[in-house]
Image: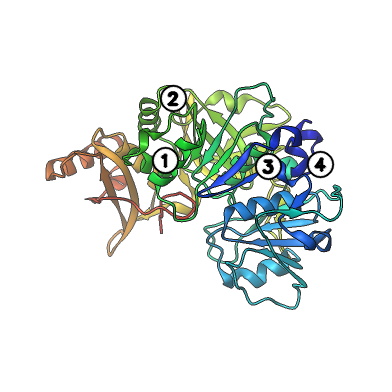
């Protein structure tokens, strides 16, 4: 069955070949094929039909089970990310018209009168009392992070979410996927769906699981394809267990991937295709680059096929894709598309020769005396230094300029901190950047803080 013919997630999973394909989370596992005649929602599955359901669960394995059970069966699934705050609960319930909650006992919100059904997601699976049929094109609602108010709710369907996922034939080499992402976010959800549509296993990182523990499990599970953010991969490069895995494919997404990181991963995993993908919750997966360089070729802007089109407007990437979200949800939702169907991604790009490079996000700009600085642009320069492992550029308040640029820098293993090295990094920035972009202070630190989403913590 092709993905375009799949009416639900359970259809996407090939029942005949799925029995031996597990989803693995630490000591627990669950077979894709076990859902043919069983459910994690037990006797409540019939009651949930056609409802708007919020999944509030800490355990990723139960989240995965609930998604397989609910897609095609309910009208809407709202997926709460790990950092979902209880103060947003009422607004999300109201705007998504939530009438049911699926939980694993890890959440205890104050339920309002609109919630008429609360269902535990249980493992192991229990036999299903009635036959499953596909009734709805279920809406998948993802909550965006990083907003100051209530999170935006982005509406997808299984069709838009799987648009960029290739169907793997049963005769193809087995792809055992692993991911550092949490499947309750767009990046992790993409890998979960690849696992559903594939022919191998899926290894998920448990909450609070260390990098070395996950790498050890990935090795035991023979992970061949593995995904994470650049920040995840920098943590891998610093970890003693980094050589435990020997993947065929390494994927970076979610942050800007610079060439120093791409080359380091290519050297560490010589048999792997190292790719960086560009995607967003709203725009979907737009492209994947495997040529060993940062950025993307200008020729991508010249393609105008029916699936994906890209353009640059005022130094910002805009995209139109059949894998984009359908809309925002809410009483007065913001506009997602412009009049020609393009989405403003909010990501700045600049052209150098025949290639475009990402400069940062609109919301992350540092204002230095009225001049604009993209932190990622400065980090890209610092990260190219032979002694630097990673960096974080941020603003520091200044009574004269309002803000100045400062940088926290993690050095590579074995590199000694010296005043000369500090000045060398600043001098390299001065030769390649405008004066107001040069860090006024470079501070050497042992590590950088990473969010639950696997990205550098910038606030």
- Secondary-structure class at tag 4: loop
Instruction: Say whether disc 1 or disc 4 marks the residue closer to the N-terminus.
Output: 4
Instruction: Say whether disc 2 or disc 3 marks the residue closer to the N-terminus.
Output: 3
Residue bearing the label numbered 1: 216
Residue located at (46% from left, 25% from top): 272
Q: Few, some or many C-alpha atoms within 10 Å of disc 1 (few <14, some 14-19, many ≥20)?
A: some
Q: Quadrant of the C terminus?
A: bottom left
Instruction: Say whether disc 2 or disc 1 marks the residue closer to the N-terminus.
Output: 1
Residue bearing the label numbered 3: 32
Instruction: Say whether disc 1 or disc 3 marks the residue closer to the N-terminus.
Output: 3
Rounded to the nearest whole Å, what is the CA distance between mark 1 and mark 4? 36 Å
Instruction: Say whether disc 4 or disc 2 marks the residue closer to the N-terminus.
Output: 4
Rounded to the nearest whole Å, what is the CA distance between mark 1 and mark 3? 23 Å
Pinpoint residue 133: horizontal percent, then vertical percent. 86, 48
| Quarter of the view holding residue 5 | top right
Residue bearing the label numbered 4: 7
- Secondary-structure class at tag 2: loop
Checking the image for residue 283, the label placed there is none
The answer to whether residue 71 is seen in the rendering is no
Residue located at (56% from left, 33% from top): 176
Checking the image for residue 292, the label placed there is 2
| Quarter of the view holding residue 403 | bottom left
Rounded to the nearest whole Å, what is the CA distance between mark 3 and mark 4? 17 Å
């Amino acid at each position: 069955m092709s993905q375009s013919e799949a009416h639900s997630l359970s259809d996407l999973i090939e029942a005949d070949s799925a029995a031996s394909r597990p989803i693995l989370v630490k000591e627990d596992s669950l077979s894709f094929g076990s859902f043919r005649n069983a459910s994690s929602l037990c006797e409540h599955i019939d009651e949930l039909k056609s409802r708007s359901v919020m999944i509030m669960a800490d355990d990723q394995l139960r989240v995965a089970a609930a998604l397989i059970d609910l897609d095609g069966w309910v009208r809407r699934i709202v997926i709460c990310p790990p950092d979902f705050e209880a103060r947003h609960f009422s607004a999300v319930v109201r705007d998504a018209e939530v009438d049911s909650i699926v939980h694993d006992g890890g959440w205890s919100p104050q339920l309002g009168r609109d919630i008429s059904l609360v269902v535990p997601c249980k493992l192991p699976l229990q036999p299903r009392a009635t036959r499953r049929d596909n009734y709805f094109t279920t809406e998948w609602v993802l909550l965006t992070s990083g907003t100051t108010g209530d999170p935006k709710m982005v509406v997808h369907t299984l069709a838009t979410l799987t648009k960029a996922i290739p169907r793997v034939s049963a005769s193809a080499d087995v792809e055992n996927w692993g991911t550092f992402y949490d499947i309750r976010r767009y990046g992790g959800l993409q890998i979960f769906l690849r696992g559903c549509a594939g022919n191998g296993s899926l290894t998920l990182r448990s909450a609070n699981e260390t990098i070395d523990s996950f790498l050890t499990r990935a090795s035991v599970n023979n992970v061949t394809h593995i995904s994470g953010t650049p920040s995840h991969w920098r943590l891998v490069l610093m970890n003693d267990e980094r050589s435990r895995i020997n993947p065929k494919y390494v994927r970076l997404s979610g942050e800007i991937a610079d060439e120093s990181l791409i080359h380091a991963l290519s050297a560490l995993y010589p048999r792997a295709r190292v790719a960086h993908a560009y995607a967003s919750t709203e725009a979907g997966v737009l492209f994947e680059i495997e040529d060993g360089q940062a950025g993307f070729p200008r020729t991508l802007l010249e393609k105008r096929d029916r699936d994906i089109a890209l353009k640059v407007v005022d130094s910002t990437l805009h995209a139109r894709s059949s894998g984009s979200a359908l809309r925002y949800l809410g009483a007065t939702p913001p506009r997602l598309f412009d009049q020609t169907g393009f989405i403003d991604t909010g990501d700045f790009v600049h052209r150098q020769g025949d290639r475009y490079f990402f400069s940062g996000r609109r919301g992350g700009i540092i204002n230095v005396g009225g001049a604009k600085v993209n932190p990622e642009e400065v980090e890209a320069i610092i990260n190219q230094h032979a002694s630097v492992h990673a960096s974080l550029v941020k603003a520091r308040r200044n009574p004269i300029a309002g803000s100045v640029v400062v940088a926290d820098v993690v050095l590579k293993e074995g590199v000694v901190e010296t005043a000369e090295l500090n000045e060398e990094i600043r001098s390299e920035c001065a030769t390649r950047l405008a004066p107001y972009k040069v860090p006024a202070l470079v501070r050497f630190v042992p590590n950088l803080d990473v969010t639950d989403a696997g990205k550098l913590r910038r606030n």
